[in-house]
Image: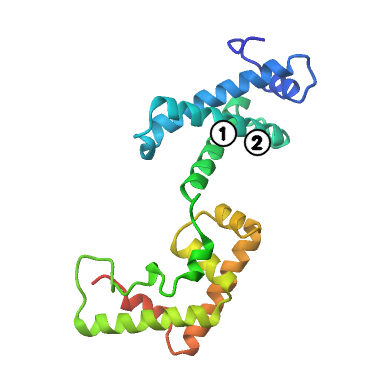
């Protein structure tokens, strides 16, 4: 069946499951559709890729389309028929593209480097991120709190909790990337970060520093 002759949802499912003789043709038709859709997404919707050549974007789309095709096949049973099958498959493909781009962005991210640094860059004593400089007294108080915060993190958390909390909550690394690097899954990582936050809050409060106090201290005034 030519791709120009549109299949029904039922025809797509039957062919992709191997229930009809045209499974190879259906697979290639779908891969081609997904590649075109991903190319459009990468070239039109992703301003961060504007510097790439058309050849590079085409190659990315080809690689991602193969991954997306496998994901669609693996999840055929989750298609409920609420839309055209090709529309659903394209949504799956875009999610695959987004995930692949995130992984590429953090390819060189090192969890070990977080615990190896004696004074992490994210805890550099730069009082506030706003344009206005705080008063000298307030700046001194902020530096003292940052120092105590760094000490509390190392005292209260295990290395694994520290890595997870800093990667997810401070560096905004996607949870799936952190989970993969830590050899765990997303649910376990979520619990690890939750426990780390709870332990850190309890430790800080035992030192007389409430979260409300610290939030007010670092407000940009």
- Specify which label sits upstream in the sequence, 1 or 2: 2
Label annotation for residue 71? 2
Q: Residue at x 40, y 79 (%)?
A: 212
Count the numbered circles shown.
Answer: 2
Q: Looking at the picture, does residue 157 appear above or below residue 1?
A: below
| Residue 62 visible to the viewer | yes
Q: Residue at x 38, y 28 (%)?
A: 53
Check contact, mark 1 vs mark 2: CB within 8 A: yes
Q: Secondary structure at mark 1?
A: helix
For residue 103, side relative to residue 150 (left or right): right
Q: Looking at the picture, does residue 110 appear above or below residue 94?
A: below
- Considering the image in quadrants, where does the C terminus appear? bottom left
Label annotation for residue 148? none
Quarter of the view holding residue 183: bottom right
Q: Position of residue 181 (x, y in %)?
A: 59, 56
Residues 37 and 213: in front is: 37
Q: Position of residue 134 (x, y in %)?
A: 21, 76
Q: Which residue is mark 1?
A: 93
Q: Looking at the picture, does residue 138 appear above or below residue 188?
A: below
Q: Secondary structure at mark 2?
A: helix
Q: How busy is the neighbourhood of tag 2: few (under 14 within 10 Å), some, or many (20 plus)?
A: some
Q: How busy is the neighbourhood of tag 1: few (under 14 within 10 Å), some, or many (20 plus)?
A: many
């Amino acid at each position: 069946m030519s791709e120009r002759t549109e299949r029904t949802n039922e025809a797509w499912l039957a062919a992709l499951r191997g229930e009809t003789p045209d499974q190879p043709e259906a697979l290639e038709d779908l891969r081609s559709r997904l590649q075109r859709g991903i190319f459009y997404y990468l070239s039109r919707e992703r301003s961060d890729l504007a510097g790439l050549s058309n050849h590079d974007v085409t190659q990315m789309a080809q690689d991602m389309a193969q991954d997306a095709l496998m994901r669609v096949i693996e999840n055929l049973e989750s298609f409920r028929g609420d839309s055209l099958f090709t529309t659903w498959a394209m949504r799956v493909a875009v999610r695959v593209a987004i995930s692949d781009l995130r992984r590429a962005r953090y390819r060189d991210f090192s969890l070990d480097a977080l615990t190896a640094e004696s004074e992490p860059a994210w805890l550099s004593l730069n009082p506030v991120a706003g344009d206005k400089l705080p008063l000298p007294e307030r700046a001194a108080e902020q530096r003292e709190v940052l120092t105590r915060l760094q000490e509390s993190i190392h005292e209260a958390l295990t290395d694994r909790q520290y890595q997870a909390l800093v990667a997810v909550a401070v560096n905004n690394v996607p949870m799936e990337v952190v989970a993969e690097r830590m050899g765990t899954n997303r649910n376990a990582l979520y619990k690890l970060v939750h426990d780390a936050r709870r332990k850190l809050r309890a430790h800080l409060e035992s030192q007389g520093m409430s979260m409300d106090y610290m939030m007010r201290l670092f407000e940009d005034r």
